Amino acid sequence: MSDAPETHPAPAKTPEAHPLDALTGGAFSAATSGERASRIREWLTTQPAPEQLQEVFKELSGRDKGAARAVRERIDELRRAKNQEAIAAEWADKAQALLAASKLNIADALAWQRDAAKAGAPLSREPLSLLKVQLADRVKVIEDLQHRVQVQREAAVLLAQRIEVLSTKSWRDAQAALEVLRADVQHWQDQAEALSGDPSWASVEARFPPLLDASRTQLLVVWDAFQPAVAQAVAAAEDAQAALPPVPVWADELRIARGVPVEAPAAVERPARAPKPKADPAVVAKAGQAVRDALAKLEQETAEGHGKASVGAAAALRGVLKEHGRHIDAALEQQVHAALVAAGELEGWQRWSADQVREELVAKAEALLKRPEGQSLGGRKMQETLRQLREQWKQADQGGTPNHGLWKKFDEACNAAHKVVEAWLDKVRTDAAEHKAQRMALIDEVKAWAETPAASGDWKAVNRALHQFGDRWRAGGHVGEKIFAELQPLWKQAIAAAAAPLEAAQKDSLARRHAMIEEAGALGAAPTLRIDAIKALQQRWQAEAQGVPLDRKHEQKLWDAFRKPIDEAFNRKTAEREKGAGEPTARDRAVLDAAKALDAANATGDVQQIRAAMAALEAALRGQAQERAEADAKEKSKPNQTPAPASEAQAAIETEVESAPDAESGAEAPAEGAAPAPKPLARPVVAVRGDDRPGMRKEAPAALGRGGRPGDRRDARPGRDAGRPDARGPRDDMRSGRFGDRPAYEDRGPRLGDAAFRAQRDAMEHAQQALKKLAAQAHGEALTQLLTAWEKRDAALLPSAQEIGGRVTPAVRGAWTQALGKAPAGDASQALLRLEIAAEAPTPAEHLSARRMLQLQLLTRRNDPAPTETWGQDAATVFASASDAASARRLQNVLKALLRKQ
């Protein structure tokens, strides 16, 4: 055991607990600041009293300012809540006073909301939120009443117009519409009474009740005048002695109904209006001064933007105007009305506040990214929209106090939407770089193409390639203005170098085309139109146009200038030809006379006359009638006159024509000592073909060419008749071979004029139609006579063989005569079936089985004659039997077809 004295350690000193630890949950004895702040927040959730908060904040602010901040914020919040409660109570009293008032001014209701927000009143909490809704509903009701007043005013105008329109129509229309109008007018009055009886009617603006009263007065005046007028019109229509209504249209209508002539209404002499007594100048001056003072006050309040004060000033001005309005001049009255309108606009503008505009802008900014699928905005549209929204926000800030909370929401929404713009800008930059590279590559391609040999020679291909390069440049995509300004000169330089050879060729082509235009003008101005030269010139133009292309419009202008002189020359030639063809020749007159005679024969309906007239027209077409008339004239002139030299000349011509083939075939020429044949005189020209082809003109010999082929026209092309011995006679030496059996060409003489040709063609067509019609009529008449003879059993009624037609032989007709001369006997059912088979006519349904059986039997009788060969005997068998309606109908159908077959 140790001799050292035993020592006991002194116990550690326990810190004393803070008096507020029990209240705050040990916040003052917490070891760390974070734990202390946590305990303070937990204590604040228990909603301590303001005195406790003050005491804790006083003790804690010296130890831990971070933990004391939460207590201070709660104290400030309670202080603000207390202030807001007082403010809310104040503004609640004001709102209740507005609602309790019998007359609510819309401007006061809107100003209450604006001023309460400025004073910091909690409009989103009760009771202010409920009062705000009630005021808004009350304002909406008042505005609805004002709108309905305007609607009623328009309805009254329309009703009055309906009544006025009825006064311009018949009184019967007005009487018919009277009940409908009465119902409409009563309905309008009921609606007007409902408006004026509405509890909120006293709050309507002062200008609306007079409008409704004026509309009611105007409508009732028109209606009260319309009803007696209609009643008076009805009474006047029933009683001729009653007075006429005061409506002029109705009075005229009733006068006409009474048989009284309508007279122009005499002008009603109106008594001259009594001159307006002049007012005292002192009274006028006093009235003008009072109105000017009220007007100046209203203009001042309106200019300063005071909504409430402007309403009072406007009411004061209206009162002064009502009292002194009759003593002021028109200019001052116009100023008063303009000031009242401006005050009304200011009052309406007070409805909108800056915060409402900002809230709308925030909603628009947030809605940019919440659009429906398929309706999202593009980058450029989004950029423009954001720019406009920010400009509108700046304007809203200029008219009121900024709102940082709404600005933060608006800025966040705009920044979120701007991401779309950024993505679009990145894409635009990428596309611009790609488009620039493509355009540079196209410029290099044009430069390389211009150096190749393929870029010259085929000018059409060159022009096409240049156009393709231009299209590719235009479709190269969008680039910025600065980049485009750099690339455009390079492109113009490259394309100009590539197009230089084509432009030089086009310049030379233009010179050649202008030369051809001058040559065409010379050919068109020549007295004789050279067709071969014109064709050659046109071929040169076509070759030039196909070789070197020009601009379409320029080429069309050149072509029009080239063809104009040629067209004018051809038009002159056509006019000359038509002028010569307009004079009818003797042959045309003969054809026209024959066509008229044929038309007259067609009108008679006589077959013999029609056929004779057709033969005469054909003879006139061949010229026989003219030749016969000339021969008759010569025969008549022979006994009285000596032969003229012309007859000798004609004989010489005929002799020369007859001897021409022998001379051309190798016969010997007449002896030198023989007397020369007399020179033939020229025959008078009847018609000359207006043709200037080579060989057709008298001064130009026909060009030599290959011999004409059979079937070619004599006037087809030059050179066709060169190898003929006689252009108008038969060519026996050229008829051998494949086409040797063709007849000689017929001499048809000169061509007919257009009028004669059309006349003979129409007359021939009408004649053929008339003959067909007459033949059908004769066929029907003969068939009717035949059936009548069968029905009456009288052979004398049987038509002649000529009337029946060549299909019926005399033997068949004799058999029919014998059958009709006897009494009816036998069965004709099988004979009718054979006739229907021969005519291929349908058989009635009840006899179809018998027809099929007969056809089968005929197939087995190979040596018996067919029904088509014995139809005459079958018809005689039918005629020998008794006649009935069904059999007559069947016989008529088969004979209609059999007698027509030739």
Image (cartoon, rainbow, N blue to C red):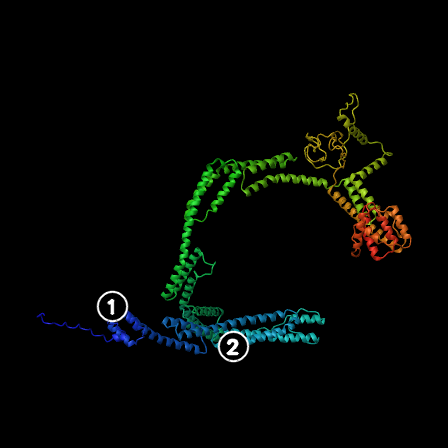
Amino acid found under the numbered disc labelled 2: Ser
Q: Is residue 71 left or right of residue 795?
A: left
Tell me if residue 361 comes above or below residue 152 in the rendering.
above
Name the residue furthest left: 3
Residue ID at (15%, 72%): 10
Q: Look at the image and tell me whether residue 498 can be seen.
A: yes
Name the residue furthest front: 1
Q: Is residue 590 left or right of residue 382?
A: right
Residue ID at (70%, 41%): 578
**x and y percent of residue 472 in the render?**
48, 45
Query: Between 426 and 307, which is closer to the camera in this rendering?
Result: 426
The image quarter containing residue 727 is top right
Query: Between 296 and 869, which is closer to the camera in this rendering?
Result: 869
**x and y percent of residue 341 in the render?**
47, 69
Query: Between 255 and 326, which is closer to the camera in this rendering?
Result: 255
Pointer 1 or 2: first along the chain: 1
* Crowding at mark 1 (Cα within 10 Å: few <14, some 14-19, many 20+): few
Q: Which residue is mark 1?
A: 32
Q: Look at the image and tell me whether residue 480 can be seen.
A: no
**x and y percent of residue 254 in the render?**
69, 72
Q: Which residue is mark 2?
A: 196
Cα separation between marks 1 and 2? 75 Å
Which quadrant is home to the N terminus? bottom left
Tell me the mark number nearer the camera, choosing from 1 and 2: 1
The image quarter containing residue 510 is top right
SS class, disc 2: helix
SS class, disc 1: loop
